[in-house]
Image (cartoon, helix red, strand yellow):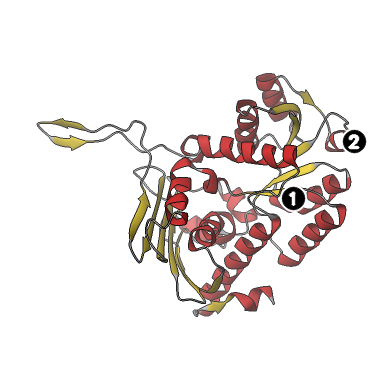
């Protein structure tokens, strides 16, 4: 079975997913929609698909699934629209910035018997998958501590920051999902610190650019997350998992896996510069997993519940910064 896709939103992440669909066996991109015609035309010309309105896509008989890459405040409405239309839905994170609205959208999907996958692409990175496989195989014993480093080479535009929901809901949310996945159990409490160290304009926009978070489970397992909007040396993405019998880690990815030596010492190529190059394989693997779920009628590997819990941890981190204390996740989820 070939799953026929439409991409909603032809901006940066929409283009990434269009490329992923084109690279995956069993997936075909048949339509794209964007309010900016030039953006839609770029995707249509690149992949030979139609340009259609969102309503046209919802009623299209040749579309099995949609990938939602539109602004965050449209995600929940589109999830509901396409669940009612009988289309499988892949939605970029977050589902919404409001937990009650997320719950409402998930209820609609459940009532319709629909399929929903939330875009946490880092679970599908080959190196991170190998880390998880080592944990599941018992290679490091019982997981005790997880350390996640995620630093961007530069901040997004201020207009984006103002509408993003803040660094915890936009950037750290990926790391919250990774922490839950690697810890293997739910987080009980969140302690966060946040500062503006890289650009005063980010603070003036009501956000932070430098954050650290400690997550703790009921069993006492910990995850430490460190984020920055500025890493002058490239896109810094590392994971380390300490267990009772050992440690497993995933290092950064450079432009080439080589080391040069000369009279001035040792040197390596620069790191891959941003998510569009660092996570090419992850995005393709993610869409391939979604295709398999749709084709087989099976559960998706990243679910609406995963999206809900990652947002709850982000909300807990915001409250922790505001009140200067550890926040129980149950305070957020009720």
Residue 59 is labelled as 2
Classify mark 2: residues with Cα within 10 Å, few (<14), some (14-19) or many (20+). Answer: few
Asked which secondary structure carries label 2, the reply is loop
**Quadrant into which the N terminus falls:** top right
Asked which secondary structure carries label 1, the reply is helix
Q: Is residue 170 above or below residue 260?
A: below
What residue sits right under mark 1 in the picture? 75
For this rendering, which residue is in front, 221 or 42?
221
The residue located at (53%, 60%) in the rendering is 176
x and y, in percent, of residue 260 in the image: 20, 31
Q: Is residue 171 above or below residue 266?
A: below
The residue located at (88%, 33%) in the rendering is 56
**Residue 283, located in which quarter of the rendered image?**
top right
Looking at the image, residue 167 sits to the left or right of residue 30; the answer is: left
The residue located at (80%, 35%) in the rendering is 64
The residue located at (45%, 71%) in the rendering is 221
Is there any visible trace of residue 114 in the rendered image?
yes
x and y, in percent, of residue 148 in the image: 42, 57
Residue that extends furthest to the front in the rendered view of this protein:
137
């Amino acid at each position: 079975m070939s799953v026929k896709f439409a991409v909603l939103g032809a901006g940066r992440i929409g283009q990434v997913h269009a490329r992923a669909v084109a690279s995956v066996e069993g997936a075909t991109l048949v339509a794209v929609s964007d309010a900016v015609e030039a953006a839609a035309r770029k995707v249509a010309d690149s992949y030979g698909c139609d340009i259609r309105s969102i309503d046209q896509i919802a009623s299209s008989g040749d579309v099995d699934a949609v990938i939602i890459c539109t602004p965050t405040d449209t995600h929940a409405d589109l999830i509901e629209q396409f669940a009612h239309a009988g289309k499988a839905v892949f939605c970029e994170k977050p589902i919404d910035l409001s937990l009650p609205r997320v719950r409402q959208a998930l209820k609609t999907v459940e009532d319709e018997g629909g399929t929903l996958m939330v875009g946490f692409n880092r679970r599908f990175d080959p190196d991170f998958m190998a880390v998880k496989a080592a944990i599941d195989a018992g290679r490091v014993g019982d997981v005790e501590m997880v350390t996640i480093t995620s630093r961007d080479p530069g901040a997004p535009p201020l207009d984006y920051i103002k509408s993003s929901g803040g660094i915890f809901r936009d950037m750290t949310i990926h790391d919250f999902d990774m922490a839950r996945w690697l810890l293997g159990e739910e987080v009980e409490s969140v302690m966060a610190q946040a500062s503006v160290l890289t650009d005063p304009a980010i603070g003036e926009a009501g956000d932070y650019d430098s954050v650290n978070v400690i997550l703790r489970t009921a069993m006492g397992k910990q995850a430490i997350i460190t984020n920055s909007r500025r890493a002058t040396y490239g896109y810094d993405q590392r994971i380390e998992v300490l267990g009772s019998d050992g440690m497993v880690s995933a290092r950064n990815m450079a432009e080439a896996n080589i080391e040069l030596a000369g009279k001035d010492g040792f040197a390596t190529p620069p790191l891959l510069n941003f998510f569009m190059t660092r996570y090419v394989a992850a995005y393709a693997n993610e869409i391939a997993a979604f295709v398999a779920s749709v084709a087989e009628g099976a559960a998706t590997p990243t679910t609406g519940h995963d999206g809900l819990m990652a947002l709850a941890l982000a909300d807990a981190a915001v409250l922790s910064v505001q009140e200067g204390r550890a926040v129980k996740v149950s305070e957020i989820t009720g």
